[in-house]
Amino acid sequence: MRYTTILLGFAFMFSLNAGQAAEKINWYSFEEAVELSRNNPRKILVDIYTDWCGFCKRMDSETFSNPKVARYINNHFYPVKLNAETTDTIRFQGHEFVNEGEGRRSPHQLAVAMLQGQMSYPSIVYINEELELLTAVPGFKTPEQIEPLLKFIGEDNYITTSWENFQESFTSTFR
């Protein structure tokens, strides 16, 4: 009986750890995230990527698959994956955004607008609860590099603190 209790305890602890390791980001479409934020205000994080971008694939496999990153994003943002070259029509703030390009690798109007014409992949766009663009951050980020950005914006530090001052006093909790 005693060994059974110990084994059940180990099994329970293992299942908790396995559940943490398996945590994934709950991605939404852009329109779903906007609707969710209108009903229950929360910031929106938009991962702007392309299918051919190697660093975009690394962000998925190394950064977004990190359980601590996934947990934080799920708890503080409505996360969106937006293919910068999608041909879908996306409605936002009374406008229809489309991809007017006819060639390969033509960008979608919404991606161009959010990145303010600075097309760099991957880029993470942060939108506040009023559905206003806060910033777009280009480039591949490791879990350690994205953590301060997530917390700077996700916990509203950007309202009272400069990015430089925040970075100086930041202590990682993802490690």
Image (tube, grey):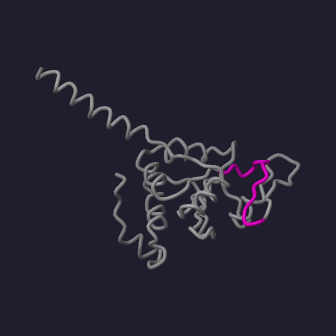
Residue segment shown in magenta: 82-94
Residue toward you, 83 or 38: 38
- From the viewer's perspective, tell me whether residue 22 is left or right of residue 51: left
Residue 32: horizontal and vertical position, in percent? 64, 53
Position of 152 relative to 160 (above/below): above
What predominant SS class does the magenta segment belong to? loop
Query: Residue at the spot x=39%, y=39% of the render?
Result: 21
Query: Residue at the spot x=61%, y=61% of the render?
Result: 125
Query: Residue at the spot x=42%, y=45% of the render?
Result: 67
- From the viewer's perspective, tell me whether residue 146 is left or right of residue 172: right
Q: Quadrant of residue 123?
A: bottom right
Residue toward you, 39 or 77: 39
In magenta segment, residue 31: no
Position of 64 relative to 3 (above/below): below
- From the viewer's perspective, tell me whether residue 18 is left or right of residue 52: left
Query: Residue at the spot x=75%, y=48% of the render?
Result: 86
In magenta segment, residue 84: yes
Residue 6: horizontal and vertical position, in percent? 16, 27
User: Which residue of the protein is positioned furthest toward the front in this rendering?
Assistant: 39
Q: Quadrant of residue 2?
A: top left
Position of 133 relative to 111 (above/below): below
Residue 143: horizontal and vertical position, in percent? 45, 52
User: Which residue of the protein is positioned furthest toward the bottom in this rendering?
Assistant: 160
Q: Quadrant of the N terminus?
A: top left
User: Which residue of the protein is positioned furthest toward the left in this rendering?
Assistant: 2
- From the viewer's perspective, tell me whether residue 106 is left or right of residue 8: right
